[in-house]
Amino acid sequence: MNESSPTLPTVLITGASSGVGLYASLALTKRDWHVVMACRDLPKARAAANELGIRGDRITLLHVDLADQASVRGLVQAFRATGRSLDVLVCNAAVYQPRLEEPMRSPEGYEISVATNHFGHFLLANLLLPDLERSTWPSRRLITLGTVTANSAEFGGKVPIPAPADLGDLAGLEAGFLAPVAMIDGKRFKPGKAYKDSKLCNMIVGREFHRRHHARTGIVFNTLYPGCVADSALFRSTPRAFQVIFPWFQKNITKGYVTQALSGERVAEVVAGEDFAESGVHWSWGNRQREGRKAFSQPLSARAQDQALAERLWDASVRCVGLSAGAGAEDQAPR
Ligand code: NAP
C-alpha cells in the first residue's frame, strides 16, 4: 500500500481488518479520504481490503495490538513516520470474549477486554491528541464506538444478560486492576459484563474528552452506536447457536439489525458528515434506522453522566496506562 494521496484528509481507524472498521474504511476511501488501517493482523487486513476492492493507494496499513501498551506507543511513532496529518481518529477495535471462564490478561496484566477496548484506546487517543490539534482540517474529530448494551438509558442497555454494564465505585480499577482483580467494580469476573463495562468506559471517556478538550481545541469528540451488526466477527466467540439465532432475532424481532456495509457508512457519516460536526454527542441509531431515519443524539444513563465518576475513571485510567496527569503531552515516556 503506498502513500500516493498526501493531499486527501486522513483518518486512522483501529480494528479495520473486519466488520465495522473494514466497511468504514471502504466508505471513507470512496469519499476521497485516505485511511490508515491500524490492525493487529496485517496480512488479514490486506486480504480483507483487497477482497472489498478498496483502492491500495487510498490506504496505509499499520500494526497495532491495542492490548499491548508498547504496541500502542509504537503505532503513534509509526503514524508520525508516515508524515501524514491526522484529521480524524476512529477508536473502533474491540474484543468480546463472553465464554472465558478465567480472565485473559494483557502484557501489562490487565483483563483483556478492558485492556483492549478501553485502555488501548484511552492511551492512543491521549497520545494522538496533539496530532489532531496540529491538523488544519476544518472539522477534526475523535470518534469512538460505543454500544447500546452499555447504555441503560436505552432499552438494549437494560437487558440483564449476563449483567448490565456497571462500574460500581471503581474499586477494582482504583486498586490497580491487576490480578486477582478482573472487573472494574472489583467484583467476580463476568466476561460478557467486562465487555459492556469497557464500552461504557469508551462512552464516558468520550464525554470527558469533550469536556476537557473541546473548548480549547475545537476538536469534535463523539461516540456512536451504529446499530446491531449482529453477524460481524465480534460474536466469533459466542456459541454456534447464538450466531444463528442472534442475527435472526435482531432482524425480525427488535429490527435493530444493520449490515456491516451500512454500519460502515454510518461511521463514515460521523467521521465526515456535516450533520455530525457537533461535539459531545452520543449518536445512536438503535432500532430507529428505518429507511430514511437519521441518527439520534442519545442521552447516556445518569450513571454515565456522573461527573465525579468520570473524573475518577479518567485518573485511574491515566495511572493504568502510564500517562502522567494532564495526559495528552507528546513526550509521555513508556512505563
Ligand atoms: P469485529 O468484526 O470483530 O471487528 C473488531 C476489530 O477489532 C477487528 O479488526 C479485530 O482484529 C480488531 N481487534 C480486536 N482486538 C484487537 C487488538 N488487541 N488490537 C488491535 N485490533 C484488535 O467487530 P465489529 O462488530 O466490527 O466491532 C467494531 C466496533 O463496533 C467495536 O468497538 C464494537 O464494540 C462496536 N459495536 C459493534 C456492534 C455489533 O453489533 N457488532 C454493536 C455496537 C458496537 P482481528 O481481525 O485481528 O480480530
Image (cartoon, rainbow, N blue to C red):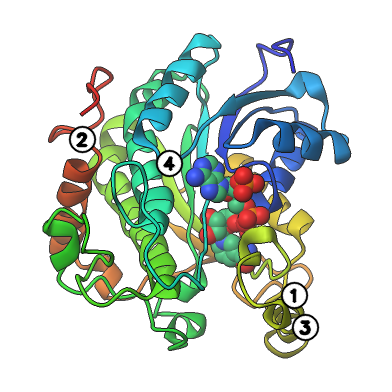
Residue 241: image location, x then y, percent = 72, 83
Q: Amino acid at mark 1?
A: Arg
Q: Amino acid at mark 2?
A: Gly
Asked whether, in this view, residue 302 is left or right of residue 3, the answer is left
Q: Amino acid at mark 4?
A: Val
Q: Residue at x 21, y 71 (%)?
A: 185
Q: Nearer the viewer, mark 2 or mark 3?
A: 2
Tag 2 residue: 322
Q: Which circle's residue, 2 or 1, is located before the other in the chain?
A: 1
Number of numbered discs on residues:
4
**Few, some or many C-alpha atoms within 10 Å of disc 1 (few <14, some 14-19, many ≥20)?**
few
Tag 1 residue: 290
Q: Which circle's residue, 2 or 4, is located before the other in the chain?
A: 4
* Disc 4 CB within 8 Å of nearest ligand 1 atom: no
Tag 3 residue: 248
Tag 4 residue: 220
Asked whether, in this view, residue 284 is left or right of residue 184, the answer is right
